[in-house]
Amino acid sequence: MPVDVRALDADFYVFSGHKLYGPTGIGVLYGKAALLADMPPYQGGGDMIDIVRFSGTTYKEAPQRFEAGTPAIAEAVGLAAAIDYVRTIGMGRIAAHEATLLTAATEALRGINRLRLVGTAPHKAAVLSFTIDGMHPSDIGTLLDQYGIAVRTGHHCAQPIMEQFGLPGTVRASFGLYNTHDDIARLAAALRAVQEMLG
């Protein structure tokens, strides 16, 4: 979705490249110029220094002072291509497609016996986390893989909230611009088959 950091009055804002269909290992950090100007560099390396002397070192102005060493050139080119790709399709079109898939998937999974959706906030991203009573999330994920369905399982870097809910983890299905309603039907059918296998 489009984000206006000025309207949010965000001091800092980050995102990962792979969440935007780009390569892994790269992301973006936005920071207000005044805050970045007051921050010292967190690491040293080529091209972030201004002057180096035995008496002291000075650094370039932000943001260059935070770009130590050789940048991730290939990843930056890949991220730029991903941004162009998403802009060409249109963020609004992508968001609308994902919202339609989320609604359809929510309804499809609600009809599965013993399945509990975890996290049903309005206006959420096209992600469904769930558990099935009596089944471990890892077992569900392993069996779904046998049906050619990729999901994530585990605590998803959110152990405190899992503990709050009394869960060892969840299964998470994420939907993107490449998914279809057939994918949702396949997921629901596979989950029913998994239930039959595991009882």
Image: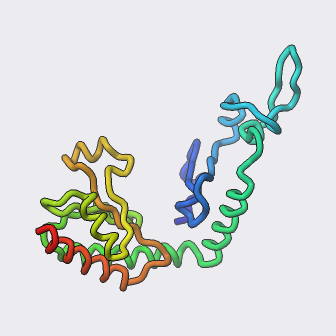
Please give left or right for residue 89 compared with residue 179 in the image: right
Relative to 170, residue 42 above or below: above
Q: How many marks?
A: 0
Going 36% across and 73% down the picture, which residue do you hit?
149
> What percent of the width, then of the height, locates residue 100?
39, 79
Q: Which residue is depicted at the point 13% across and 72% down?
A: 113
Classify residue 133 by image quadrant: bottom left
Where is residue 181? Give x, y as percent: 37, 84
State the scheme by which the image is colored: rainbow
As drawn, 27 above or below 163? below
Query: What is the x, y in percent for residue 153?
Result: 33, 58
Q: Left or right: where does residue 144 sit relative to residue 125? A: left
At x 49% / y 78%, what residue is drawn? 178
Q: Nearer the viewer, residue 60 or 112?
A: 112
Farthest-out residue, left: 199
Residue 192 seen in the current view: yes
In the rendered view, does 62 fall on the left or right side of 19? right
Q: Quadrant of residue 44?
A: top right
On the image, the x and y values in percent for residue 183 come to: 37, 80
Q: Residue furthest bottom?
A: 182
| Quadrant location of the C terminus in the rendered image | bottom left
Residue at (30, 61) in percent of width and height:
171
Residue 62 makes an appearance in the image: no
